[in-house]
Amino acid sequence: MRSMTLSDRLDEQARRVMPGQHSNLPGYELFGPIWIDRAAGAHVWDVDGNEYIDYICGMGAGSLGYGIEAVLGPMREQLDRLPYLDPGRRHPAEIELAERIVAHVPSAEKVRYLLSGTEAVQLAIRLARAYTGRNLFIRFDGHYHGWLDNVYGGGVDPDPSGPPYALYQTDDLFTSKGLDPDVRRQSFKLPWNDIDVLTRTLERYGDQVALILMEAINANGGCCMPRPGYLERVRELCDQYGIVLCFDEIITGFRVSMGGAQGLLGVTPDLTTLGKAVAGGAPLSAVCGKAAIMDLCQERTVVSAGTFNGYPLGVVASLATMRYLEQDDGAFFRRVAEVQAPLVSGLREIAARRGVPLLVQECPGVVMCYPVPIERAWNIGDWYPVADHALGERIRKGLADQGVLVMFRGRWYVSGSLTHADATRTLEVMDGILASL
């Protein structure tokens, strides 16, 4: 039996006064308590002195890495000039930040700030309902839009005879006690990347749908890219039925490109939700989109109240992040790609050489690596039911034991601070783990 570490003792102490992790989603816990003491670049150190290469990155928020002086320096200078940090007052930095978001994100004509991605999604739903005068919205299996009742969990109904409301099941990984049972009637839940299912649904119910809400690249569901032509056809259907299209770019915004997934893929939604990377890890989110929709907030016909909406610390952090990302015509994104490419090819080569079926999928800044006996997945339904989840957890634990932290279900975030040496060390650890199976 191992001796108790400082992390163990802190965990024991925390349990007496704190009810679990900050994000207590099922499965996202590590195998033992890790209390982080400090961080630099792409590395973190726990209170016991153990060093880790970090692919969790604050659940994706830390896109730049840690302690980036080129970001922190300008941020400190701006904060030093602020006579107050009163979240109830406006600051001129909000205007500059909004102008930069409008310049980079294709859908953005106006921008409204909030604090979390969950809030941003709820505002998008409210705006779409107000704009269309309809109530229903459509969401998709494997996509995550926050923890509130109306978007959390639920399965796709295999019975095509009735309205495709989300099914809440006890074995659903993303479920919770205490959910309002009536909220399932607010949305339809469909398989993503299946245009025939969406078309049939809209043929029957399109005049009742206010919003189609999706990740344009399904990072949460396995780094699944849209099928060729899928997003374009969704855009056409939304125009045909007068439906607001919203891309949830909480993960992909300012991570896959300066224009997000929509800029990368060339399809423009009506609304976009941003968070995580928009402020390099500081708490800030935003909804941006067409002025005709966003101006419902200006008119106060749609309420989006919040003490910390546009609070100066988050705005200044986001502004410093944005200026950093803009440097040298997107050099940040090229650096991430240069490190990610050999990491991904190395994972595939090791899996093939060791005879372990690993599904390795990617989008810029995000990698999914998980034991699945297929070569490509277009949605979560393709891979999750046939994945070897027990082996996936063995691999995740083996990585953590040897100083590499990755997320549950094999998601890896590649920060701008990850080096070629970090990637090489990661591949060495993975090779040893797969060799031992």
Image (spheres, grey):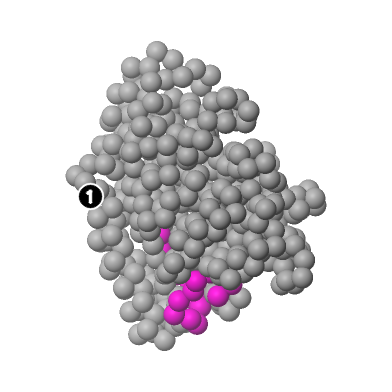
Q: Secondary structure at mark 1?
A: helix
Q: Residue at x 26, y 41 (%)?
A: 326
**Residue placed most toward the observer, 107 or 403:** 107
The amino acid marked with disc number 1 is Ala
* Whole-percent x, y for residue 87 in the image: 51, 21
* Whole-percent x, y for residue 381 in the image: 59, 72
**Residue placed most toward the observer, 355 or 148:** 148
Q: Residue furthest right?
A: 181
Q: Which residue corresponds to mark 1?
A: 331
**Residue placed most toward the observer, 320 or 13:** 320
323, above or below 36, in the image? above
Q: Residue furthest left?
A: 328
186 left or right of 431?
A: right
Q: Is residue 407 visible?
A: no
Classify 10 Å Cα crowding around label 1: few (below 14), some (14-19), many (20 and above): few
In this picture, which residue range is highlighted in magenta?
A: 366-382
* Whole-percent x, y for residue 246 in the image: 53, 49
